[in-house]
Image: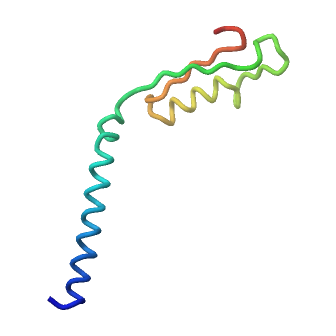
Amino acid sequence: MTNVKRRDFLTKSAIGAAATGAAVVAAPNIARAQETFNWKMTNAYGPGSPFYVTGPGSPEDFCKRVTEMSNGRLNIQHFAAGEL
């Protein structure tokens, strides 16, 4: 076997081993990907505060967007100050 063929063989073997290793490491994450998560988030301000924001850019809007972007896998329930 010439040096060029040996080098090609070793290179392809290393690439194959790396791909196999990546697949083995990723397999549990793929199986776990269907799990859903429910988080709680609190706000520093209560509903009576002038800093309490509703509508676009609000904590409720953030929670809704996270749920939409994660296809329902991550649900965040928002609580105002003092509710928990």
Q: Residue furthest right?
A: 50
User: Which image quarter holds the N terminus?
Assistant: bottom left
Q: Is residue 10 left or right of residue 55?
A: left
What is the x, y in percent for residue 39? 53, 22
Left/right placement of residue 12 relative to residue 57 reads left
Residue 16 placed where, x, y %?
Answer: 25, 65
Residue displayed at 66% across by 19% down: 42
Which residue is more in the foreground, 76 or 53? 76
Percent across and percent down for residue 43 are: 70, 20
**If the image is split into quadrants, where does the C terminus sit?**
top right
Q: In the rendered image, which quarter is residue 19 located in? A: bottom left
Q: In the image, what residue occupies the spot 26% across and 83% down?
A: 7
Percent position of residue 30, x then y: 32, 41
Find the residue positioned furthest to the left. Answer: 1
Q: Count every numbered label the image shows and give the total.
A: 0
Instruction: Give the answer, above or below, for where 21 lies relative to 72.
Output: below
42 left or right of 25? Answer: right
Who is closer to the viewer here, 12 or 32?
Answer: 12
